[in-house]
Image: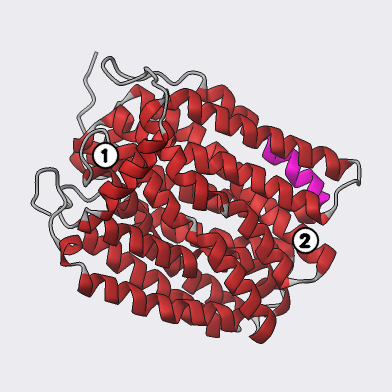
Amino acid sequence: MFERPVRQGGLSLTSPRFSHTFAAFREPGYRILWPASVLASTGRFMQTILLAWFVLERTDSPWQVALVGFFAWAPLLGLGVLGGALADALDRRRLWRATVTVSMLTSAALTTLLLGHWIEVWHVFVGALVSGAADALGMPSRRSLLHDIVGGERVTNAVALDNMGMNLSGIVGPALAGLLITVSGVSGGYVAATAIYIVSLILSQALRLKVGARTTSRAPKLGDVARGLRYVAGHRALLATMAITVVMNLTVTPYRQMVPVVARDVLNVAPGLMGLITSAHGVGALVGSLVVASSPGIRYHGRVYMGGSALALGSLLAFSFSRSYALSVAVVLVAGFGNAGFNTMQMSLAMLLPKDGMRGIALGAVSLGVGGGPVGMLLTGAVATAIGTTGAIGINAGYGLVAVLLVGLLAPSLRRSSVPGAKL
């Protein structure tokens, strides 16, 4: 009868700003991949907190807690590049689904051990290793699917929204794990994590790609890995991207594994409040990802990449000196905001810089850089045992800041425009 007037501006779904922020969701495939990925990531974040708390309570050892993170991330050192080669050779959808299935089955096995009171610390290490191997093999495929679905023009928006989803899972996963530890113990938390993986798998079955996207497979060759690594080594901007990835995973990634130790022994808070510290990182990262997704026409991805890295490291330096719960939550939130710039631009650069046919291996090389995380966890665990956990986090933040600044000075190509077609 009467037409309702169209709203101008504000939060209207048709406003230009809203339309750009969520542009990737125009693709049906992205509307399936995004929630399936968020659910799988939520399960992984829950496992990180649940296993770390179980080992801390069982052993009272920061070193053993660090080992949980080491086994979870160590597979990236060897399998990240292999996963990239597989992503360039096989059907990415099937490969990603297979790796999520392995993670779900591992979660189910640990749930059974917990409910039966048969679990030992070595079971935790094996479970973390298997789940980490699946994630390492599947990560390049899942991220390559972003480009397959939205194309190069909207890939930064797709990555920002994907990163926003990962950060949302980084809020919900730890908070839910901490709550469930308090209410029903680690075993109750694992029942929920396994159920979340199952829902993710069900959603992933509905994923379809656009006509023209590659779904065929060929046999991967060992030479694909060597060829890809030579390509990355000869591309200065990609090499600098990988260098900062290594630095950030050596220095920033380990702190999240040590949050249970800081919460219990330094801030003297219960598991529920411990989970909120890690969730604060996710809140900051969620806001940062939304800012990036809402920023059209980003040309200097490398500058945002380095700036976000420096902000995250500076915030962790402040966290290492904090003895106040409220202040710790605040600086972790800022660290998450900076880390959003690092994570979003890391993946955007890995997809925008390489030529066609090398995108999977470039993402695999970045995954190899992410493999610096387990090495950092071992070093952090050793230093934490010797001088204390907050001292180890402070040392990491300090040398990380210096390293990022050096890479920025020595690799001017990373500071130049990285839009498709720009000279690098």
The amino acid sitting under disc 1 is: Val
Q: Image height check: is 188 above or below 56?
A: above
Give how far across and how far down residue 248 sits, in percent: 42, 65
The amino acid sitting under disc 2 is: Val
Q: Which residue is mark 1?
A: 155
Instruction: Give the mark nearest the N terminus, 2 or 1.
Output: 2
Q: Closer to the observer: label 2 or label 1?
A: 2
The residue at 39%/20% (across/down) is: 217
Q: Secondary structure at mark 1?
A: helix
Q: Quadrant of the C terminus?
A: bottom left
Q: Image height check: is 328 above or below 164?
A: below
Which is the main secondary structure of the residues drawn in magenta? helix
Residue 22 within the magenta-colored segment of the rendering = no
Q: Secondary structure at mark 2?
A: helix
Give how far across and how far down residue 287 sits, in percent: 39, 56
Q: Residue furthest right?
A: 117
Q: How far apart in space, not on screen, are marks 2 and 1 (Cα)?
A: 39 Å
In which quadrant of the rendered view does residue 193 lie?
top right
Q: How is the image coloured?
A: secondary structure
Magenta-highlighted residues? 184-194
The residue at 23%/40% (across/down) is: 20
Q: Which residue is mark 2?
A: 55
